[in-house]
């Protein structure tokens, strides 16, 4: 094999790293959450018409997160104005609908669940003038008032790159501003909706840091869609150049036969190598592993600890942040 082909071979090239996607490997097998605590919390959320990404995505880490005081709630409804080929969320026209009581519902649920760390995320809402940024801000403010001391991460759409929307959320009191790049440059047009773009996402993350340098930013990449080793390195370098502090790397899993197929299952060893390279680029923290998701308990514990020590000052990577998350 030529040197050129080696550099551009699939991410999981090699006997130890590559697994043909005919069936899920052992490291992706998981048990769905059960038990009295899960049933109680799930019922409480349904009573308030609240939805968690934890449940919607059948996240393998749900029980660990809920039991440890973290959760990811999806606001702004269930209908997305975009149609990404990796996502199972409904696509359509929400026609400007907003649940004006949702901020108080989120705050109440956080109090009842005893959350210490909340991730707020949403569908894309291109039908709204601000993309839903004002609603995010209202949820943050209501929750901070109801649950003093809670840390809130907002995992948002790109708000079509509007500076006013970014500033609105920055002024809400959130602790971590997250936006996912999702995949490498070459695959972005195939994987994401045509209204999203690789460069828009990078610019969005960069603008956050320009407006508020001390704000902690976070992003995520899905692996297993056919990306190459070099492309992943380039994407990670682009995120660092945009000032992103925290990175999560996880395995893409196909929601249905209507979605993009899995091209490769990336081994834990491969994730370990990628995490090491990402840390060498200067990320403050990297969670990487087959079951890691953009909202991930280990990353949130790290953020909770570090934010408590350096509130309002940002933070730098430390050599002790070396736990592998698989």
Image (cartoon, grey):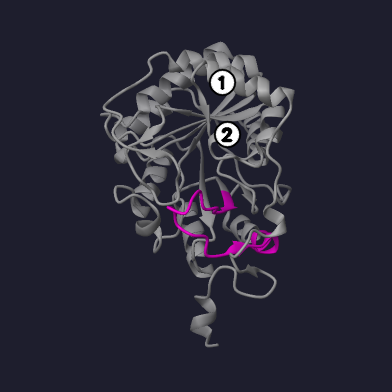
Which comes sooner in the sequence, label 2 or label 1? 1
Q: Residue at x 62, y 55 (%)?
A: 279
Image height of 291 relative to 63, above or below = below
Check disc 2: other Cα within 10 Å, few if <14, some if 14-19, many if 20+.
Answer: some
Taking 230 as reference, is 276 left or right? right
Q: Residue at image x 68%, y 47%?
A: 318
* Numbered mark located on residue 34 in the image: none
Residue bounds of the magenta highlight: 248-273
Magenta stretch: includes residue 254: yes
Does 250 lie within the magenta span?
yes
* 222 vs 234: above or below: above
Residue 289 showing in the rendered view: yes
Badge 2 marks a residue whose secondary structure is helix
Residue on which disc 2 sits? 55
The percent position of residue 292, horizontal first and vertical second, equals 62, 47
Left or right: residue 98 compared with residue 275: left
| Mark number, residue 45 | 1
In-front residue for pair 134/47: 47
> Which of the 4 image quadrants contains residue 47?
top right
């Amino acid at each position: 094999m030529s040197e050129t082909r080696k550099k551009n071979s699939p991410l999981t090239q090699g006997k130890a790293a590559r697994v043909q996607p005919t069936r899920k490997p052992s490291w992706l097998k998981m048990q769905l959450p059960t038990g009295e605590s899960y049933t109680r919390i799930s019922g409480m959320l349904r009573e308030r018409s609240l939805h968690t990404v934890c449940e919607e995505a059948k996240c393998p880490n749900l029980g660990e997160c809920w039991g440890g005081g973290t959760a990811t709630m999806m606001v702004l409804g269930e209908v997305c104005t975009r149609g990404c080929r990796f996502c199972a969320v409904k696509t359509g026209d929400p026609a400007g609908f907003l649940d004006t009581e949702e901020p108080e519902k989120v705050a109440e649920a956080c109090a009842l669940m005893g959350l210490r760390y909340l991730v707020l995320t949403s569908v894309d809402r291109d039908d709204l003038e601000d993309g839903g940024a004002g609603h995010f801000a209202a949820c943050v403010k209501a929750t901070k008032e109801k649950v003093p001391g809670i840390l809130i991460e907002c995992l948002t759409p790109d708000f079509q790159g509007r500076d006013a929307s970014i500033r609105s959320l920055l002024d809400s009191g959130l602790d971590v501003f997250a936006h996912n790049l999702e995949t490498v440059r070459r695959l972005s047009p195939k994987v994401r909706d045509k209204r999203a773009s690789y460069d828009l996402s990078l610019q969005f993350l960069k603008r956050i840091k320009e407006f508020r340098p001390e704000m902690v930013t976070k992003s995520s990449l899905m692996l297993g869609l056919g990306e190459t080793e070099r492309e992943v390195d380039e994407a990670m370098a682009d995120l660092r150049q945009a000032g992103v502090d925290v990175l999560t790397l996880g395995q893409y899993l196909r929601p249905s036969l209507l979605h993009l197929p899995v091209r490769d299952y990336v081994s834990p060893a491969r994730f370990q190598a990628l995490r090491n390279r990402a840390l060498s680029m200067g990320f403050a923290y990297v969670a990487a592993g087959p079951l890691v998701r953009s909202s991930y308990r280990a990353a949130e514990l790290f953020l909770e600890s570090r934010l408590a020590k350096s509130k309002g000052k940002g933070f730098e990577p430390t050599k002790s942040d070396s736990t592998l998350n698989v």
